[in-house]
């Protein structure tokens, strides 16, 4: 029997600047495949065909307005903002700790200044469209997705290498 890894602490870095004490929550990009149902003649039922990766997004919530993020609004280039999530996950049955990092490049799609009330913490929410994603667990790259350069590496295997080769993209 084992206990789950629990997030004990985390932070976000924006262009290398640490948001220690300012970030309250992060919704990490959801890895989702675009699957299309297909049933051809002679098949007993439908199957789902893999049509590639769905769009990725990151959401962050802060305890108040973030000037650095406001200054990145409308940045030119879909990979114009560099963000890095670092989380420490711990199992309470063995006290082993795992360092998980998610590195993204993208641009802010939505900035929500939230409701402002005197004497209360206001929420500053940001949604970032992701063009590049890399998940590193304990120093090992587990997943790397680069939509612009047609790269999708999972556990060291580039699943789009043959497609790039067939298209003459190296």
Image (cartoon, grey):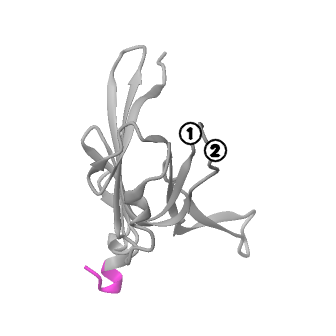
Q: Position of residue 21 (x, y in %)?
A: 39, 36
Q: Is residue 28 above or below residue 161?
A: above
Q: Are marks 2 and 1 in contact (CB under 8 Å)?
A: no
Say left or right for 59 vs 139: right
Question: How many numbered marks are there?
Answer: 2
Res 160 visible: yes
Would you say residue 167 sits in the magenta stretch? yes
- Numbered disc 1: secondary structure: loop
Query: Which residue is the site of mark 2?
Result: 117
Say left or right for 30 vs 142: right
Along the viewing direction, whichever of 7 and 44 lies nearer the viewer:
7
Q: CA distance from mark 2 to mark 1?
A: 8 Å
Residues rendered magenta in the picture: 165-170
Which residue reaches farthest front?
A: 118
Which of discs 2 and 1 lies nearer the camera? The answer is 2
Query: Is the residue marked by circle 1 packed among few (<14), some (14-19), or many (20+) residues within 10 Å?
Result: few
Q: Position of residue 51 (x, y in %)?
A: 55, 70
Query: Is the residue marked by circle 2 packed among few (<14), some (14-19), or many (20+) residues within 10 Å?
Result: few
Say left or right for 2 vs 84: right
Would you say residue 119 sits in the magenta stretch? no
Which residue reaches farthest bottom?
A: 168
Q: Is residue 170 above or below residue 102?
A: below
Query: Which residue is the site of mark 1?
Result: 121
Along the viewing direction, whichever of 62 and 83 lies nearer the viewer:
62
The quadrant in which residue 146 appears is bottom left
- Numbered disc 2: secondary structure: loop
Q: Residue at x 51, y 56 (%)?
A: 126
Along the viewing direction, whichever of 108 and 34 lies nearer the viewer:
108
Q: Residue at x 59, y 36 (%)?
A: 119
Q: Position of residue 144 (x, y in %)?
A: 35, 58
């Amino acid at each position: 029997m084992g206990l789950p890894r629990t997030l004990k602490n985390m932070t976000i870095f924006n262009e290398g600047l640490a948001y220690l004490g300012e970030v309250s929550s992060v919704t990490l990009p959801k890895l989702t495949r675009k699957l299309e149902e297909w049933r051809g003649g002679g098949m007993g039922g439908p199957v789902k065909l893999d049509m590639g990766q769905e769009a990725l997004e990151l959401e962050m919530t802060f305890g108040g307005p973030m000037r650095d993020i406001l200054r990145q609004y409308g940045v030119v280039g879909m990979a114009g903002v560099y963000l890095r999530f670092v989380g420490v996950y711990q199992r309470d049955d063995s006290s082993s700790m795992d360092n998980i990092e998610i590195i993204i490049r993208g641009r802010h799609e939505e900035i929500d200044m939230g409701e402002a009330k005197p004497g209360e913490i206001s929420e500053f929410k940001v949604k970032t469209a992701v063009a590049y994603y890399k998940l590193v667990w304990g120093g090992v790259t587990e997943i790397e997705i680069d939509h612009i350069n047609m790269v999708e590496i999972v556990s060291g295997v580039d699943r789009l290498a043959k497609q790039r080769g067939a298209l003459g993209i190296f």
